[in-house]
Image (cartoon, helix red, strand yellow):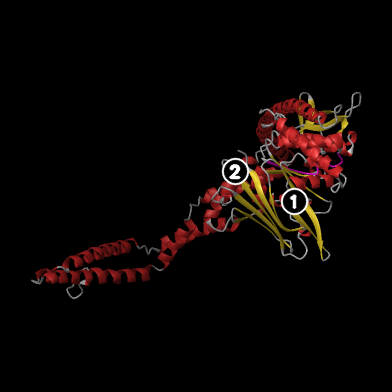
Amino acid sequence: MRSVLAEMRIQGLGAIDEATLELDPGFTVVTGETGAGKTMVVTGLHLLSGGRAEVSRVRNGVARAVVEGRFERLDGSAAVRVAGDAGAEPDDDGALIALRSVSADGRSRAHLGGRSVPVGVLSELSEQLIAVHGQNDQLRLLRPAEQRGVLDRFAGEDVAGTLAEYRRVRDEWLRVGTEFTERTERSRELAREADLLRHGLAEIAAVDPQPGEDDALAAKARRLADADQLREHATAASFAVSGAQEGDPDAPGVLGLLAEARRRLSASEDPRLRDLEPRLAEAAVLLADVGTELTGYLDGLDADPAVLEGVLARQAELKQLTRKYAADVDGVLAWSAQATERLAGLDTSEEALAELARQRAELAGELARLAETLTAQRIAAAAELAKAVTEELGGLAMPQSVIELTVRPRPTDERDPHGLPVAGQLVHAGPDGVDDVELLLRAHDGAEPLPVHKAASGGELSRVMLAIEVVLAHSDPVPTLVFDEVDAGVGGRAAIEIGRRLARLARSHQVIVVTHLAQVAAFADRHIVVDKRAMGGVVGADIRTVNERDRVVELARMLAGMDSTETGRAHAEELLALADQDKRTGAKPGGRRKR
């Protein structure tokens, strides 16, 4: 069961004041008079997909435009992972609510599952759920880079895997080549840098600083400088705790006094007094430990001036390093580690350069092998894609037209830093491979294949692009496909064939189409009409889902404005009957095989 966009609410967008669209899981069509605001439905979908927010789209007199979409049947889809990573939670029934708002001052906000999220999260979500195809998308498909992308998308996982490995090897090939060039062209400069690094490392090694040594020396110097005062304090504390060393009974210390107290409590006949003695015993143990530590401190207290002099001399040595390389000894050691690593990379010896050259040649060979594999996979997929699109054109009233996709490596010369020898030819190794892909159209038998934008008229170009979209859609994992007037410039029988194909496509995807053609609208499972209204000089739009009777009226209006005539309604009813019969008897089209 595929995911669907079940409902969309639009508020304050263009001519639409407020409207709710309930979308069919199959084929939904949106129609209306020119200027009524039906394109705002697609604009809303663009916003919901994380598209660019334009202040000009916010309806005059409102604070903000809001688009809200309700996605259902998401169980197990990648969209659930995207939402979960963003901290969004679905409703109790499993539906996920996405919201986008654009204020009149240009601020844009996004929410998913009741949680505020970056707009980019909606973009990532839409990649899993919605694909919008409009007239601008047709123009993009005329660019060579887009045509290569279309071919790769059609080719599937094989090309995707090879391309990912190609890019990984290419990055390493470029890195090694850049390093080789840098070492060769900057050898004198790098040699000077290496000499400075070696001098610094030798200076640090001679002093041999230890981690945290500067802090330890500072503390020791303070103790040595204050040795007499420290001895006086420690001796007085020791006497107070343990008493005089000569055992003067007049200065027993705290331990002596505690011993006397314990003796008297132990000798008492009162149980309450005797119970206090163990607590004094615990105190005596603690004080005895303190007395021992004070004695050890006094024994270790060094007042020798020579020791202090040695500490100060060592501090001076470390100071020389911290003045040059870092603020403290730990920083000096970090500089040393970095310098050692950098020095290893500055090896400009013939052996190092030869090793880099070997690596570069090895990577170039691996990259060339991957490039050849990628080209072969694209050539095979191009033949299959061209055949599938040609077959679609046959059903779109272009029976003599033939589509060709050429895949050719792009030649280059020695001046190209990304030049790569492949199969005896120097070609440009770009991030997407070495191939140029071009979409050609042979309009009829005997005609020369030409770039599609030169060989096709406006209406034919729309049909070619739609045929490509239909073929690609069968291999597209995105469940909801939106087509915005891709039938422009088409009429008659070709328009009926477009409607038929969109209806068949709706068997495997949710399809939403904005159209001005009654022949296309007749094939929809749900028909939404956008009506223009004007009140007090303000133009607005009402959106409604039409029943069968109103649908006949709308189709008749679309058929050259014949909504009020019996002839127009009869023609509309005939179209609906044709579409209904086709949907009941039509075969489900096959899709792209998995690679």
Residue range of the region highlighted in magenta in the rendering? 480-490
Residue 430, placed above or below residue 14: above
Image-based side of 46 in relation to 311, left or right: right
Q: Residue furthest bottom?
A: 250
Label 1 environment density (alpha carbons within 10 Å; few <14, some 14–19, many ≥20): many
Cβ–Cβ below 8 Å for labels 1 and 2? no
Asked whether 484 falls inside the magenta stretch, the response is yes
> Disc 2 on helix, strand or loop?
loop
Percent across and percent down for residue 383 are 77, 25
Is residue 144 in sight in this rendering? no
Mark drawn on residue 41: 1
Percent across and percent down for residue 182 are 72, 40
Label 2 environment density (alpha carbons within 10 Å; few <14, some 14–19, many ≥20): some
- Which amino acid lies under the numbered mark 2 shown in the image of this protein? Arg
**Label 1 to label 2, Cα distance in Å?**
22 Å
> Disc 1 on helix, strand or loop?
helix
Residue shown at 88% from the left, 45% from the top:
560
Image-based side of 540 in relation to 94, left or right: right
Quadrant location, the C terminus: top right
Mark drawn on residue 73: 2
Q: Residue furthest front?
A: 566
- Count of marks, rendered view: 2
Percent across and percent down for residue 84 are 56, 48
Percent across and percent down for residue 527 are 74, 46
Most foreground residue, 436 or 153: 153
Asked whether 256 falls inside the magenta stretch, the response is no
